[in-house]
Amino acid sequence: MSAEPLEIYLEEQDLGRSLREDVRIGLTARPKWLPPKWFYDARGSELFGEITRLPEYYPTRAERAVLAEHADEIVGLTGAKTLIELGSGSSEKTRLLLDAFTRHGELGTFVPLDVSVSALRQSTGQIAAEYPGLRVRGIVGDFTRQLDRLPTGGRQLVVFLGGTIGNLLPVERAEFLTAMRAALEAGDWLLIGTDLVKDPKVIVPAYDDAAGVTADFNRNVLRVINRELGANFDPESFAHVAIWDPEHEWIEMRLRAERPTRVHVLDLDVEFAAGEELRTEISAKFRPEGIATELADAGFERQAFWTDPDGLFGVTLAWAD
């Protein structure tokens, strides 16, 4: 069975408008910031793929280990007929769930949601070929804005993997989980991956690898702004910085100006003092009880929690009350 035509709720002009808005707000803020979603053009996605294979970057391997160990159990607990993946990308890890549903379940439909038309078209075509008989319905949308476009009815399992929820600030996480609950019916399921609090000596190198791949990935946001908005950032004049914040229990990635710099973007002239930092990402780390509380506050009840053998990464299964 071939994949169905993509349902597109996010057009190129929407992305362009959102980029302009984020750049204007973030570069005029004190301190300056940019959201991490703008890392991911074609080159950024390629660099992130390299990051996931680095020896320092444990989250992908650890989450994969959890899914490989517990995929059959997840199928048995949920009995889902529809599997929805938020921020799907290539859906590489989700294939572990699709394989388990193929072995034991009665899954009828797979619904990946992603902002990238090209990535989604490629992945849906591949999955439709790999899992004949499965209805593959790709949705082009932003998981922070288009949750109301998700299908309803039947028993559904929504998966949100990769620790991506940690890129949201606490108030944004609360808003997202509340919107997620509103998009589901009572008895639907949510499977969510979260990186766990641990020794910063393990966490920091995952965001500041010896080969410099993460540094290149971090600077890519400046290349995106140069290309899309005609800015004149010199990416090489910004140093990559990764800092552990023990109070908030998150890692921050920043770009530090190595000399005084003036950048023209949109109708702005943006000044950077030597040593001034631009925050490009937070990646919150979680404790199991904290995950359960945040889910409960949004109307979910935790049913299971698993970690990899080293206790680095957690996967929570919750159902909508």
Image: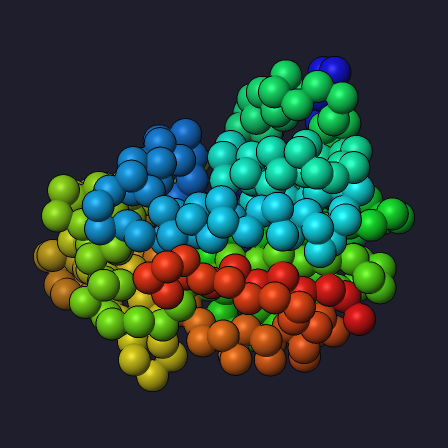
- Inspect this view and state whether residue 148 appears: yes
Where is the N terminus found, in terms of image quarters? top right
In percent of width and height, residue 307 lies at 45, 62
- Inspect this view and state whether residue 267 appears: no
In percent of width and height, residue 65 lies at 42, 48
Q: Residue at coordinates 38% horizontally, 47% vertically from top-left?
A: 60
Q: Answer with left or right where residue 119 lies relative to residue 107.
A: left
Q: Residue at coordinates 45% horizontally, 76% vertically from top-left?
A: 287
Q: Answer with left or right where residue 16 lies relative to residue 10.
A: left
In percent of width and height, residue 179 lies at 72, 63
User: In front: 103, or 223?
Assistant: 103
Residue that lies at the very extreme toward the bottom in this rendered image? 247
Q: Which quadrant of the figure has residue 282?
A: bottom left
State how the image is colored: rainbow
Residue that lies at the very extreme toward the right in this rendered image? 153
Where is the C terminus found, in terms of image quarters? bottom right
Q: Which quadrant of the figure has residue 199?
A: bottom left
Q: Answer with left or right where residue 307 lies relative to residue 118.
A: left
In percent of width and height, residue 193 lies at 51, 58
Q: Residue at coordinates 70% horizontally, 19% vertically from top-left?
A: 132
Q: Answer with left or right where residue 169 lies relative to residue 115.
A: left
